[in-house]
Image (cartoon, rainbow, N blue to C red):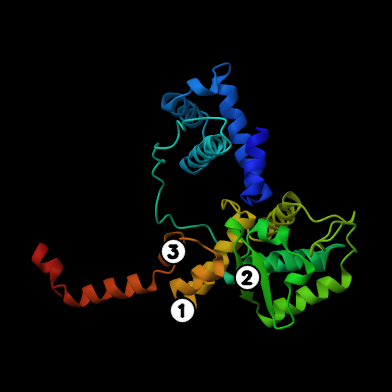
Amino acid sequence: MELFSIWMKNRGMTKATQNAYTNDTIHFLRSVHPKELAALGKMDVMRYLSEARERGAGDEARNRKLSSIRAFFNALIEMEAAKTNPAAFMAKSRQEKNRIPVYLEESELERMLHHIQGKHQIRNMAILLLMAYAGLRVGEIHRMNVHDLHPDGTIHILGKGRKWRAVPLPKPLHDVLRRTLEVRIEARTGKDQPFFVSQFGRRLSVRMIQTVAEQTFAELKQDIPALSAKQLSSHKLRHSFATMQIRSGTDIRTLQELLGHTSIETTQIYTHIDNKQLQKAMGQMAEKMPSDLLQLHN
């Protein structure tokens, strides 16, 4: 595990990825203990993933576990601590495609913002606005530093795979971020100056950012009972951003850049949200159908 940790750091993986891969690998190794690493085969990995499914893990979670195990053995091979990778040629689970994501309507987003109150109102407002109106991930907000906000109205974001992207911000959102810096507590850290700081002067954690969203959603559901059945989370605000972009006519390639998706297939799920074109296409079929269809049936 120490070799794996060094390997992941040298590869520049984010802390979130390192933690996820570490936890998955430890669970796998516990499941095969006391078997020697050199004796592990494809069946051991398949058994572990099968047991994970029985415990309720979905396809996405199982695929991540497989990626973790595969990376672990790749690291050992590269560090000359293993010769084979039992997970190397295992196929990932087929996931549902084109599943319509959960999102909030524009009117619901507006009402959500009215529920952001308290001592950290400006900070929390900025966090939720970045998710809903700039499409940022929780981890990206967590990693933001003061110097990432530029006077020209853009913000530079370190996304998945340690890839940077520049996102032009709407002026009202840029103004809120500038205001956030004015009331920001001075960080008690070293060289980095985190954009969002806790009351103790530390970089705001991923979990705290999620809590800000969860608490706001809880109040929103009381305000709008129809939302009580919706599974809302901070990531759903990113879905809301993508939905608004598609409805505004943003092309899929541009949306891919804004969201920081590596593959356009990931972005394409949002093309199924707005069905106006589908309604128009099927409405044209009505003109081609016999007007006396009911009489034909009789």
- Residue 116 in sight from this viewpoint: no
As shown in the figure, which amino acid type bears the numbered disc 3? Ile
Q: Is tag 2's residue or tag 3's residue first in the polypeptide sequence?
A: 2
Nearer to the camera, 216 or 132: 132
Q: Residues within 10 Å of mark 1 (few under 14, many from 20)?
A: few
Mark 1 or 3: the one toward you: 3
Contact between marks 1 and 3 (CB within 8 A): the answer is no
Q: Position of residue 290 (x, y in %)?
A: 13, 73
Disc 2 to disc 3, how far (Cα)? Answer: 18 Å
What whole-number distance in Å separates the C-alpha atoms at marks 1 and 3? 17 Å
Locate the N terminus by quadrant: top right
Q: Nearer the viewer, mark 2 or mark 3?
A: 3
Label 2 environment density (alpha carbons within 10 Å; few <14, some 14–19, many ≥20): many
Towards the viewer: 107 or 189: 189
| Mark 2 secondary-structure assignment | helix
What residue is rendered at 88% in x and 70% in y?
183
Q: Secondary structure at mark 1?
A: loop
Among numbered discs 1 and 3, the one appearing first in the sequence: 1
Disc 2: which residue: 134
Q: Residue at x 59, y 33 (%)?
A: 25
The disc placed on residue 264 is 3
Does residue 280 lie above or below 138 as drawn? below
Disc 1 target residue: 249
Image point (11%, 62%), residue name = 297
Q: Quick one: which residue is furthest to the top in this view?
A: 34
Q: How many marks?
A: 3
Give the CA separation, mark 2 to mark 1: 16 Å
Left or right: 225 in relation to 53: right
